[in-house]
Each structure stands twice: as structure tokens, then as C-alpha cells.
Amino acid sequence: MFPRGSSSAGAPVPACDNDQESYECPLCHLVCTDYPVLQEHVELHLEESSFLEARNLSDVDLAQRIQNEEVRQQKEAARQEREDFQKLQRQYGLDGSGDYKQQLLKNMEKEVAQGRMQPSEYHKRKADMMESLAFGIDDGKTRTSGITEMLSCYYQNESNDIKQVWLSVGADHFHCSLGDRGWGCGYRNFQILLSSLLKNRIYQDCLKDHLSIPCIPKIQLLIENSWKEGFDPQGASHFDNRLQGTKAWIGACEIYSLLTSLSLKCQIIDFHQPTDPSGKHPRLFEWVLNYYKTDKENTAKVVFTSKPPIYLQHQGHSRTIIGIEERKNKSLCLLILDPGCTSQEMQKLLKGVDSKSLKLLQRFVTGLKHKQYQVVAIDGVLSAEEKAARRQASQLFVAQRIP
């Protein structure tokens, strides 16, 4: 409470006509005749002033908190982006963690340490690896031949529910080894393709400088050479123009660039979404059937075509299609070589195939469950003019999309 007549509350003002004493508010100059009313009025001013001051302080504090939160979120987003980028680098072998040679030596050392490999075997395989890398030729340790011949014999004699089977020109199976386990499927599928192309007289001339199956580092060099020729500059930029010395994954675009640089006529077909409401890809199976079927009607149960195998890519893995079954109930089944299968598994298959063991190669429409698939299919040889046109077209890669 303010003392009556205090200048802090209000000074007396000249009396009105009725001689009643009046008081003026020092803050807004309101005139009151009742001092307690004036006192309450002034206290309201002071409370309002305190509230506004507190609110201003709260606004400043809130603004500071908002700014601090924005800075924190920006730092968190930058950290997450770095982690995601590093994760992708590790996932696709671009993190500088080594290459085929280093991984093979490291894994063989682990095998010796754990008693699964004798030191003498380690030194022998190391010497074989060094020779393989020096000549750029695959050592053949993961190779299995004779698969097409085995399939032909089986379908001719044992399979009664099959209407017809179309097979590519014979292909050898290659599986991922200690040196490329986890990332080498694309390279191994190229080896499978090349093993078939080398048996096909149609492609002998354009492959006369590649009569041996290259090792993985040599395949990396061949892809780099295709980039230097001008194929797929966007893809080259993605890999910083370098595959050698890395464990980089490759996919359909790299396979296309390499094959085209070798003057092989090929195309990428992108089955970018399922063509069945249940998430299946029946159009993919139909496309493969049309690829292998020849123009002439062939009533033979097993049809040997002149077509090379087909490279099949989906997220995280790739395989090779070497044929297709058409069953009496009209259903289709792909025959696939998977680099993830070991040569031991393939050798068992060669020793005695039956309907159960054949499932290692068979994939029905219900077995292809990924959202997107891409295929690279070879169908002839390019002239010099056609190759130049394909190189120019690869400046902006556009695959044929189905649907």
C-alpha cells in the first residue's frame, strides 16, 4: 500500500467544483477521486508491466530453444547422412576396405587359424592366385561344367510333366569364392555368360581377344575400359571411374556396358513392378519364353537354342537364366544358375539329378518375390556403326520398361 498523498501513487490535482480531492495516475494520467481505487489501478499497471517483461523473457527463451533445436536437428541430419553414406560405401564395396586379393588372403588366413586349411594348401592357393592375377585369367577353382548336358538327359528320360524345355547354349557355373564372397555375384554371372558365348560360333569373332575366362580384377579392368570408351558416364561417375582395388558391386548397367564394348548386341529390360496383383512377375516369365523360342515350330521335348543365357538382376543379388520349362499345365519355370551355390552343390547335382535336387535350379513364378527385376539379354553382334550409336545412347541410360 502506498501512503496517502504519496507522489508514488498520484499527486493531488486541483479540486473539482464540489471541492472533492482528486488524484492522478503517474503512468497514464487517469484522474480518480478515490485513493484506494487509484492504488489498485496503479498496482494493475505494475502487474501488467511485470507480466509483459516476463513474457518478453519467455519469448526470448522460446526463440533460443527453437534455434537450439534446429541446430541440433541439422547436426543430427548431417550425422545420419554421413552414416548412411558410409553404410552404402561398405555395402557396395566402396569404403576402401580392400579388394579381391586382400579379401582372399585374409579369409585364407582365417581358414588356417581355425584349422580348416593346412598351411601347405594356403601357400599353394596363394601362389595360384598370384599367377591368376598376373595373367588376368580365372583359376577355375569355382567352375562346374556339363550342366546343360545333364539337364537335357534328365528332361528326355525322367520328366513326364514337362511339355517342352528351351535351353541356352551350354554355360558353366561359377560361384563366389573366399575372395569375392558377399559382393562378387555380378562378376561371376559375367563369367557364366562368357563361358556360353565362347561356345557359340556366332560370337567367336568379336571375342577372339577374350578366349579365356577372366578373373574378377580383370573383369573390373574391362568395365573401366568400357567407361573410357564413353559408355555409361553416369555409372562411371557413381564408381568414381574405378573398380580395380575395390569390392564394388556391379549390376545390369555395368554388364550392359561391358558386353556392348565387346561389340555384343544386348538390351536391358526393366520389370520395374509386379505384373500380377499378388506381387508376381508373370510378364518376366513370358518374356524369357519368347526370347528362347525360335521362329520355327519345334516339337522336340528339349530344344537346344542358339541363344546365350540371360543376366537377371534384383536388389542385392544377380543370377543367370539358362533355360525355361513349359509344363503340361501351361505353367512356366525358369532354370537359373546362382553364384551363391557352391561347386560342391553343383557337383552333387551332376552325379545324380532328380526332381528334388533339380529344385536348386528351378524358379517358379511364386519364387521371384522382389518388387523389381532387370534382365540383360544378348542377341547378336554389333557393327561398328551400331556400337557407336549404342555408346552415344548410353550417355543417358534408358531401359525398356515392362509394363
Image (cartoon, grey):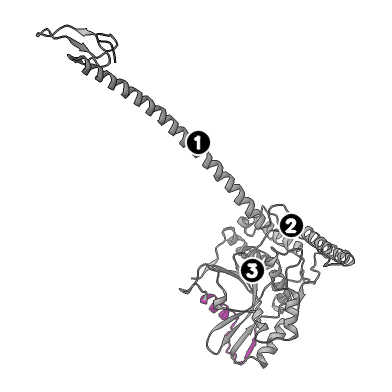
Name above or below for residue 350 compared with residue 375: below
Q: Residue at x 73, y 63 (%)?
A: 180
Q: CA distance from mark 1 to mark 3?
A: 47 Å
Relative to residue 53, is residue 153 drawn left or right?
right
x and y percentages locating residue 170 in the rendered image: 71, 80
- Span colored in magenta: 282-304
Toward the viewer: 288 or 181? 181
* Tag in front: 2 or 1: 1
Q: Secondary structure at mark 2?
A: loop
Q: Secondary structure at mark 1?
A: helix
x and y percentages locating residue 275 in the rendered image: 48, 73
Q: CA distance from mark 2 to mark 3?
A: 20 Å
Toward the viewer: 213 or 283? 283
Relative to residue 251, is residue 65 drawn left or right?
left
Toward the viewer: 90 or 207? 90
Name the residue that disc number 3 marks: 318
x and y percentages locating residue 97 in the rendered image: 73, 53
Q: Secondary structure at mark 3?
A: strand
Q: Looking at the image, tell me whether mark 2 or mark 1 is earlier in sequence order.
A: 1
Residue kind at label 3, given as amino acid type: Ser
Number of other residues with Cα within 10 Å of mark 3, as a class: few under 14, some 14 to 19, many 20 or more: many
Do the numbered discs 1 and 3 sit on residues whose CB atoms are within 8 Å? no
Name above or below for residue 4 compared with residue 341: above
Residue kind at label 1, given as amino acid type: Asn
Task: Determine if the magenta segment contains residue 394.
Answer: no
On residue 244, the disc is 2
When asked about the image quadrant of residue 269, the answer is bottom right
On residue 68, the disc is 1
